[in-house]
Amino acid sequence: MSHDYRGVQWTPFKVRYDRWMLLGVGLYLVSFIIASSIFTPPNESFAPIQILIRATGTVAFGLLTFILTIGPLARLTPRFKPFLYNRRHLGVITFLIALVHGGLVLLWYHGFSDLNPMVSLFVSNPRYDSLGGFPFESLGFVALMIMFLMAATSHDFWNANLGPDLWKAIHMSVYAAYGLLVAHVALGAIQFEKDPAYVVILSGGATLVATLHILTGFQSFTARADKVTDGWLAVAPAEDIPDLGAQIIRPASGEAIAVFRRGREIFAVSNVCRHQGGPLGEGQIVDDCITCPWHGFQYRLEDGCSPPPYTEKIATYATRIVDGYIYVDPKPGPPGTPQLPSNIGESE
Amino acid sequence: MKRAHRKAHFGVWLVLAPAMVAIIWFAVSLRPGQPVNASLPDALVVDEASHVS
């Protein structure tokens, strides 16, 4: 976790995941190039570099679309949690592919200009006042710069030194990058490519991402814990919480609380991971520790402390069970405060 | 996720989603029309002058 830094924290799972990811990207590129060579009408010939520009552009847009669906999909179904855990590597790969796409565009369309290619990118089409003829390449460039900033600060070193709040704010700019890319494709490829597949991919991808984010965002605001008895928040029947899993409750004020079950024991802790603010209640109990679904940071159930040698602490909450129903005291103890679990079957 | 981040996240998508829909709709409407098949006949035009009442 945070006591030292390594270039990349490889695990056997991450290595396997990255291999599959690279294999998938490679297969897509090869398939795209072969399909383009076969299906392009004889009167429309493209240079190999143009085909490569299309191939890298479509795969980068597709990967970014997939990355942005992982978070909400992992909330809707646990099947996507492995992708959540490895999202960072996917993001860096996406940036590198987008960088190749941008480099090829610069080389092919601006490399032979009398101007500096970077200058040519911004001034060769000066119609900044026209939406229809807008120089769409500049939108892609700004998106690429945002992705560069994110890839460059993706390491835990930056999270620790910038602080989780600033780091998160920087990384939320990926949504702006995605919006810019949608505009880049809409005003670019959609205008030039005859194949309606480009329209379908763009509108389908953007609709999917936006719908999932709005749906899960709306769900998180409506799932409020508004039933209060003697100052205690009502959570759920104890049997409803899956073993080694949790239920998240959101008090009217303050941060969300994750109520975990381990066998017959019930514990409640802050839902906010100390690393990057990940939703602990969407994680699981692994090796008797709450494990964050984002990057695997761990906390003990009994006191909210990370196991040695790590030093992170989260707030803990008192719990009680009345007639089989779990209640949580919404006033947290200081981070790291030991709490006795409530036991299912020992109702007050 | 912190409450503030969730709010910001939700707010961003409430703005971004309609903006993306608008730009895609605009871009599709700008798209050059599909090529027509020149071998198909034009619509039938009735020559009013040739009608005998």
Image (cartoon, coloured by chain):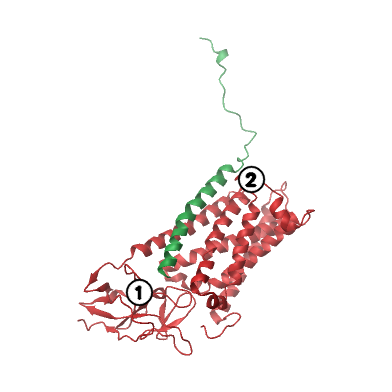
Chain colours: A red, B green
Answer whether residue A175 is visible to the viewer in this image. yes
Considering the numbered disc 2 on the image, is that residue within a helix, a strand or a loop? loop
Quadrant of the drawing holding the C terminus of chain A:
bottom left
For the point 73% across and 50% down, the residue is A45
Residue A298 lies in what quarter of the image?
Answer: bottom left
* Classed neighbour count for the residue bearing mark 2: other residues with Cα under 10 Å, few (<14), some (14–19), many (≥20): some
Q: How many marks?
A: 2
Left or right: where does residue A342 sit relative to residue A199? left
* Chain at numbered mark 2: A
Residues at marks 1 and 2, CA–CA distance in whole angstroms: 50 Å
Q: Nearer the viewer, residue A98 or B18?
A: B18
Task: Tell me the amino acid under the disc marked 1.
Answer: Ile
* Classed neighbour count for the residue bearing mark 1: other residues with Cα under 10 Å, few (<14), some (14–19), many (≥20): many
For the point 42% across and 66% down, the residue is B4
Tell me the number on the disc at residue A10.
none
For the point 66% across and 64% down, the residue is A99
Q: Nearer the viewer, residue A313 or A259?
A: A313
Q: Nearer the viewer, residue A177 or A289?
A: A177
Tell me the number on the disc at residue A257.
1
Vertical relation: A140 (above or below) A26 = above
For marks 1 and 2 on the same chain, the one whose residue lies earlier in the sequence: 2
Vertical relation: B29 (above or below) A33 = above
* Chain at numbered mark 1: A
Residue at the top extreme?
Answer: B53
Task: Give x and y (percent) for residue A144.
Answer: 62, 62
Task: Give x and y (percent) for residue A43.
Answer: 72, 46
Task: Give x and y (percent) for residue A318.
Answer: 29, 81
Residue at the bottom extreme?
Answer: A308
Residue A155 lies in what quarter of the image?
Answer: bottom right
Residue corresponding to mark 2: A133
Residue A51 lies in what quarter of the image?
Answer: bottom right
